[in-house]
Image (cartoon, rainbow, N blue to C red):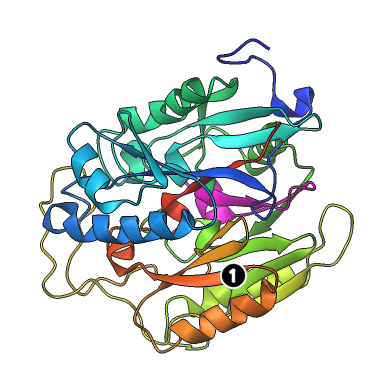
Amino acid sequence: MKRGMLTSTPQEDGYRMPAEFEKQRRVWMCWPERYDVWRNGAKPARLAFARVANTIAEFEPVTMITSEAGFSSAKGMLGSDVNIIVLPYNDAWVRDTGPTFLINADGNLRAVDWTFNAWGGNVDGLYHPWDDDDRLAGLICDRLDIARYRTEGFVLEGGSFHVDGKGTLITTEMCLLSKGRNPHLNKSEIEKMLKEYLGVNKVIWLKDGIDPDETNGHIDDVASFVGEGEVVCIDEENSDSPFFYPSKEALRMLDSSTDCSGRKLKVHRLCCPKNLVRIPDDYQILSEDGSKCRRPGDICIASYANFLIVNGGVIVPQYGDENDERALLELQKIFSDRKVIGVDTREIVYGGGNIHCITQQQPFAG
């Protein structure tokens, strides 16, 4: 098989994105370094990233990407089971900047290399530059010696969709129809791209996400597939919360949806933190022109749904909130055959994301 960029599409070649709950080979991550995103020189964020990586490594291999400057700090904080490599990148959101991996019926591995523009480019992107982030997926594919499908000019991020591996995808209109991504395409044209590049044949469109100012509403803070014909969705109980109406609308739409086989979805409710998570008063950050301002008191996008499914486990965000344990218990009932583990990720949500945002699973192939 010829490596490098392909001119066909995954759908034409018989490739699909497997579900996150299918068997995985490893998880990819990037080490946090930007001082205009992470407070106190990224030191608190690195502790949180290390907790996530070391926890995942209890279940499957982890590869952490660092810069030359960040290598020593990563080496000192990560366990021996975490492999560290050096590649150029702009920030640590590998779910959105890394490749979306695909497999075919023969177990061969390929990937999609989406165009990345920092969640909105010059319209409402979160930082500049993003050129190294846009190149990262290709570098990872080269490292793995696998072929890739580059969607030059079509912007998408891995956190904006979830698939069941059998032909169904969920996403949000708020994100995929945002002006900073693909304003030259309409909804049906964007849906066609999703089908061609992810190997799906049905797209379930939810209306809004809960983070309009960060990613324009990524789905991975709201809902995800947890099995064939099964999804989990956040259920905010406090009507004063900014997440209340988006969560209720998402639940309503999912309750009335079917998958690509016509099967009615089984929808599991997942609680939200009892209290809003806010950036603390002692938050110190070096802001730069072109990067999102983060101020003490700002509401963070703290969702228990931003978990990662791994081989035999589920890694779940925790916030020091009274609903932390409740969320773990609710997810343990859903994932009865996996070990559900909570990790404190407050320092990650201060920077605008969470566990799912900073990880990218590579499926088992071959």
- List x then y, in percent, for residue 129: 26, 33
State the residue in front, 84 or 204: 84
Q: Is residue 189 above or below residue 148?
A: below
Q: Quadrant of residue 88?
A: top left
List x then y, in percent, for residue 200.
75, 42
Q: Is residue 121 left or right of residue 185?
A: left
Q: Secondary structure at mark 1?
A: strand
In the rendered view, does 41 fall on the left or right side of 84? left
Q: Is residue 161 magenta?
A: yes
Q: Which residues are magenta?
A: 159-179
Residue 43 sits inside the magenta stretch: no
Residue 45 % position (x, y): 25, 58
- Is residue 182 something one can see in this rendering? yes
Vertical relation: 108 (above or below) 56: above
Furthest-right residue in this view? 262
Q: Is residue 303 visible?
A: no
Give how far across and how far down residue 151 sits, in percent. 55, 26
Amino acid under disc 1: Lys
Q: Residue at x 30, y 47 (%)?
A: 126
> Residue shown at 62%/15% (left/top)?
6
What's the residue at 12%, 58% (across, down)?
A: 40
Mark 1, other Cα within 10 Å: few <14 / some 14–19 / many ≥20: some
Q: Residue furthest front?
A: 80
**Would you say 51 lies left or right of 146 here?**
left
Q: Would you name the residue on which mark 1 appears?
A: 339
Q: How many marks?
A: 1
Judging depth in this view, the residue of 163 and 335 nearest the camera is 335
| The N terminus: image quadrant | top right
Quadrant including the C terminus? top right
